Amino acid sequence: MPVPHLGEMLPKKSMDNTDKYLIEVADLKTHFAVRKGMLRRVAGWVKAVDGVSFRIGRGKTLGLVGESGCGKTTVGRTILRLISATAGQVTFDGSDVFRLPGSAMRRMRRDMQLVFQDPYGSLNPRMTVDNIVGEALTVHEGVRGRKRRDRVVSLLEKVGLAAHHAGRYPHEFSGGQRQRIGIARALALGPKFIVCDEPVSALDVSIQSQIINLLQDLQDELGLTYLFIAHDLAVVEHISDHVAVMYLGRIVEYTDRDELYANPLHPYTRALMSAIPRPEPQRRHERIVLHGEVPSPSNPPSGCPFHPRCPIAQERCSREVQHLEQKGQGKEHLVACWKATGGQGAHCADAHDVV
Amino acid sequence: MKAEDILVSIRNLSVSFATEAGQVRAVNDVSFDIRKGRTLALVGESGCGKSVTALSILRLIPRPPGRITAGQIMFGKADLLDVAENRMRAIRGNHIAMIFQEPMTSLNPVYTVGDQIVEVIRLHQNKKGQAGWDHAVEMLRMVGIADPAQRVREYAHQMSGGMRQRVMIAMALSCWPELLIADEPTTALDVTIQAQILELLRKLQQQKNMAVLLITHDLGVVAENADEVVVMYASRVVEKASVEAIFDEPLHPYTQGLLRSLPRLGRHAERLDAIGGSVPDPLHFPTGCKFHPRCPVGTDDKRCRTNEPELREVRPGRYAACWLAPGYETQSEHRSYE
């Protein structure tokens, strides 16, 4: 049975989708082969991403949240064609990314960039900042010498660094400054879309907020579109327009951020939100503590992938997979759960049962 | 605070490390008390000296290059910085135990987890053979590992991150220490697993009336788990108070900045209130108050730039190291806080 995806379920806006949405992902699957034995025979598949669909409006931010191993990073890299997809379609600015021939893909790469989590591992320690930021300018545009230096300096200034930093090496910088260098590198070719893969989780608390503010300022100034991948729901809430929650290779809930935080419907989303320790000692909030751990994507449970840990699972959940479905009458709010209802209050009663 | 409530009392601790570029003072004149059965959170950003302070309690600072240059760490009647090494070995793991951030690298990959727990039990409790193994299985059951008799024969790589951290806790608690030092115990874990581990720690702490020194940078974890909070910045304690007081009304501008900069669930702000600049290099600490180049309130004050403020009790139970903290000036003399 074909997996229905967001694009099908939403009212079609006939032809202006390309104008409104920069990127549309339809039923994306990325499976990795597990090979065993001398002949390296395929012994099984890890379904890292298993039918993910979403779209991001121009100049908007989609937050992609989930725990380690849920496939969020693989989604980001597959969209950029850094990992090849098993199935599905990605439409970027009107063209089908997976079908583009090499030369056209190279041109398209200028429009889609990536900021990495680890500001230590993602900068070549033997290259100066000038070369790190400027390399793409030479490769893609043939800019060299004085001209390139000027562009690098203006990029550095845009991310809050100074001209005299250009001649230095990565080890001379703090974590926050390195992340700024990584952002300058991503901006070098004037992209439209940036995948930010956990861009602040390796940074200290006081530096995290600086980088988040910088990313927001750049978005306002340059009209960038972000896919913001993170495990920290508070950070995602702050920066995103829409949020997709992933569990074991699938999106289990998708809506705009106000709706998600005011009215989370999927039991996994609710557990995830209640698990976050909050900096308010007076108000100890109720907590849903999930039992067990995330199952291995090479051997996922039958039916709903969340059912072994779900506090409200029914017998049906272990047999059938529920796909994303609109809940309630109001805003676009898609949930992959039989028991989630759109009605106000219904889910709250459940939450009390399980605490 | 009554003297008999205090389990560990750290006074004027200073630790230096010799590097090629010169002496780095990682910990500078740090004093605080850990109370019996309570949780004290040591908060700060990377490099502020919080882990070095904790390692000093167990005398695990690698020497060279590290050296404890001054101070006292009183545990009962003994100064831990002064006792003989064989006595210290009897304290480590038995009276004071520690769990680390990285459960993968702190477990030995070539021994089963049972071997590693039994080692602690054999050393300190004189339980040999089957008795030791039974104890190990019991500990694994207590930390919520399913099928402990089976798991005790497994290796660290066969377990998930959350399970490894449970094994670390089982090992650390196998002799029921009076103090558990937990250095970023959940930083490497997912939030749903973090919630499980923190709940487990709270439960075991209550059962055995154990004190916990919780080292973390996560202010949410602090708010929900600590009784008292010590905030460190650039090798010094800048603020100390009960957890309610710190979150209600932080007195030091650094603490204020940290709390303001956090994105919070359900509270939208257009921009986050970031602290400018970055943590200073310990080889080139600024003069005066080490926070003054980043401080939003003290930049114009001459004292902030030239004189380092010591930690003072600015009102009952509240300590701050800031010239501009309300009440700081009137406390002209350093009052120790016994």
Image (cartoon, helix red, strand yellow):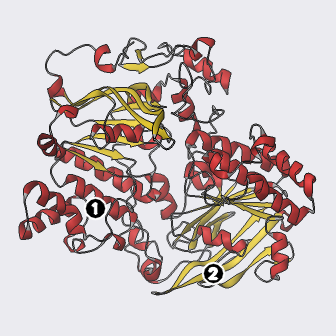
Type of the residue with mark 2: Ser
Asked where in the image residue B21 lies, by quadrant, the reply is: bottom left
Q: Which residue is drawn at 28% across and 47% down?
A: A216
Q: In this view, does B255 lie to the left or right of B211?
A: left
Chain for disc number 1: A
Type of the residue with mark 1: Ile
> Can see residue B268?
no
| Callouts 2 and 1 close, C-beta under 8 Å | no
Residue identifier under label 2: B14
Given residues A55 and A71, the one toward you in this image is A71
Q: What element carries label 1?
A: helix
Residue A38, position in %: x, y? 49, 44
Q: How far apart are marks 2 and 1 (CA)?
A: 35 Å
Name the disc covering residue A181, or none.
Answer: 1
Given residues B290 and A56, the one toward you in this image is A56
Q: Residue at x 41, y 54 (%)?
A: A208
Dot 2, how many residues are within 10 Å of its Cα: few (below 14), some (14-19), or many (20+)? Answer: many
Question: Quadrant of the image for the N terminus of chain A?
Answer: top left
Say whether mark 1 and mark 2 are on the same chain.
no
In the picture shown, does residue B265 fall above or below B314? above
